[in-house]
Amino acid sequence: MLARRLLAVIPLLFIVTIIVFGLILLVPGDPAVTLAGENATEERIDEIRSELGLDDSVLEQYGRWLGDAVQGDLGTSLYSSSSVVELISPRFSTTVVLAAGALVVALLVGIPAGMVAAARQGSWIDRLVTLGATAGVALPSYFLAMLLVLFFAIRNPWLPATGYVPFGDDPWLWFKGLILPSIALGSSGAAVVARQLRSALIDVFHQDYVRTARAKGLRPTKVVMKHSLKNAAIPLVTVLGLQVSFLLGGTVVIEQIFGIPGLGQLAVTAVTEGDLPVIQGIVIVATLVVVAANLVVDVLYGYLNPKVRAQ
Amino acid sequence: MFRHRLTVLVTVAALGVTVAACGSDDSGSSDDSAGGGDAVETTDGDAGSVTTDGASSPGTVDRDATLRIAYSVGPSRFDPHRASSSFDNTSLFLTYDRLVHQSPEAEAVPGLAESWEFNDDGSVLSMKLREGVTFHDGEPFNAEAVKANIERGQTVEQSAIATELAVIEEVEVVDEFNINLILDGDGASLPLVLSDRAGMMLSPAAFDNADLDVAPVGAGMYTVTDYDQDARIMYEAYPDYWDPDAVQAAAVEYLIQVDSVTRLNAIRSGQVDWTFVDPPQVSEAESAGLQLLEVPSLAFYHLQLNRSFEPFGDPLVRSALNHAVNRDAIVEGLQLGLAEAAVQPFPAGYLAHDDSITTDLYAYDPELARELLAEAGYGDGLSFEVIVPTVPNITQLGEAVQAQLADVGIDMSIRAVQPSQTADIFYVQQEGEALVSPWGGRPDPSQTLGLLYSDTGFSNPGRHTTPTFMDAFAATLEVQSPDERAAALRAASKAVAEEALDVILYFPTTPIVYTDEVSGVVGWLSGKPEFRGVGVAG
């Protein structure tokens, strides 16, 4: 079953790359004009176009790209001689670390908040969590990022305002540099997690088996942790799966604000330059991440709900 | 269920990439290293100045310190002959030396060539080269190296400077430190052309290096020790640089931060010592106690006309457009005063600026504009399409101009395009009747004049020109004494203004921001800061 899904990724990637290729070619503009420099002539632009093979037919260009891609060669950037794989891999790991940081924030804040709110439904703390969650979803991440920088990097110089230090260079600086971007990126996730978990838990609390557990005289914490949480986790896992793709998109903005050299920044540059091989590479990576997140979610369903496994 | 959700997720991922595309547009204005030609060069955020005021702090410079700067873009590539954007210069100047240098006022001064002169008929440019210079890899700099570099620039695949060097027919090595450039055509602009990427010297031993795009081998002030593309460049002082006074820091850390607010945050939180910001961030920078240097630039914003569009072939219509735009309102409203309103293609204080032409030539006068239009036969109105790249400040400018023209009965419809595609759409495909965009400026004034207004100019869609301008322009190409040439350039600039070949709006000033630890900060009129003599206190 897992193998079948993995196989299904191949046609999916194929379709995605065709769509991206088509979209780029539909947009007017020509990298050769840029590459010819600022005092170009039409002849020079034509020369460069043929040097890069941009004057071949669309089918030829796509075929050439595809032929290399299936051999693991995603090509080279039109604007520098770096290979697409070389460009993407360091940035991909940076973005993954950032997205993971945001997920950690979302879970560390969202799960306790959701649990407390559900356990004390209707209390002031429940209202506070609901209010906070609404604010968390409504507040744009870039705005929160600005506020965080202002308070924690400029007014009080505790954390760096910009930049990213690789873990290998200095683990402490790496950690400090990740705090603000992770909070900015993870806040809406935390809000979503808290809301989902709260309503799912409240739902579960009304189930017969929870009433039974309570009637047996189990401590409330045990009722929540052992009997309710696992069942309430199914919608939560679904939401987390969706969050992965939101985070991937969200890093684009957050990376700009914090000056972090991640996949998002690369995507911005590549799209504005019309650097087709790089765009294709990023889309493939993004697609693979999303597919992987889906698989993980499905496997977790099986763990959380034996009925799914049986199917 | 699974398939359905997958579709949703893939769509969301695709949206992420779309957001990426849009994101670039909010990310500050000078991020067009990618850009094609000038149409996308949003130089409003770039350095360049004729003043050095407030430059040095009295404190002593620590020659062991690292100068930390944040700039909006890194190089498109470190191969100087194939780097395609003038914004590459900022990172390239630190590590590559050029045959000719520029003064802060953007005039040609000796560099790796100690002196140069044309022969009487202007067919040969002789250069005397500096002796005792070595490249970072130990290769000697000499006449053979210059010959090899120029020939590579003319012929290497994807050369971005082949056009600039086309006038050189042959490089003749006279002796070890003297060369003759044999010219085919007018070479008056060549010295300043050689002060740009076209004159950058690359070690001949490194010509075929596979990693040349990321690992430069020049003869400049600093060597590149580490390069994380789009993020950070680390430079280290080159101990054998021929002008030790230029190298005031042991190292330079060059951070690439697209967004102006991000750069301001970086300097406010003490992560960098020097950066530049967009006009809206100036008051915040000042109140944070940072040093500020407002730097004029050769770049200007204009409503560029495709004069082969029939109405724009009529000087009355072009005059009307010039009178219909309210330059002062634009400068105050959009640039927050950080710009100089202008009607000629060169800024005050520059050798090609004609002092007799002021903005009074085209004072804001909607009534007169309407009369001129009526006289030209467009009393019932005129409509055309303008290309506007989707960069926030340019979009605002386009809308402001649109509203001002609407007041005199001109219906200008805006077509928003991707910044990197602007040059292709307006110059190559020749779509749209006008363009709102910055012109990036050129090392030599004749380049700007020729590209924008001559009958062969690549950036003159339709190639319309006037005899008066062409005569004046031809005079600027002749080899003559510097004073005579400056006079010719001023005359050509005057012709552009008087014939209303363009609707020039303003020259932006760039706010450079630095801490009081930094000394030797100079504004460069070229708009491409060079860090010669810039250091930090210990």
Image (spheres, grey):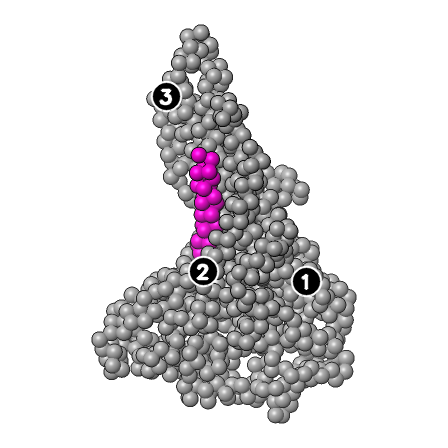
Number of residues whose C-alpha sits closer than 10 Å to that of mark 1, classed few (under 14), some (14–19) or many (20 or more): some
* Tag in front: 3 or 2: 2
| Residue A135 location, quadrant | top left
**In the image, what residue type sits under mark 3?**
Gln
Residue occupied by mark 2: A26
Q: Quadrant of the N terminus of chain B?
A: top left
Q: Is residue A250 visible?
A: no
Residue occupied by mark 3: A121
| Residue B146 location, quadrant | bottom right
Q: What is the chain identity of the residue bearing mark 2?
A: A
Instruction: Give how far across and how far down residue B269 sits, in percent.
Output: 53, 47
Disc 1 is placed on an element classified as loop
Residue occupied by mark 1: B212
Disc 3 is placed on an element classified as loop
Please identify the residue farthest to the bottom as the structure is shown.
B120
Q: Is residue A303 above or below residue B320?
A: above
Which residue occupies the foreground of this view, B496 or A203?
Answer: A203
Q: Is residue B116 visible?
A: yes
From the viewer's perspective, tell me whether residue B69 is left or right of residue B251: left
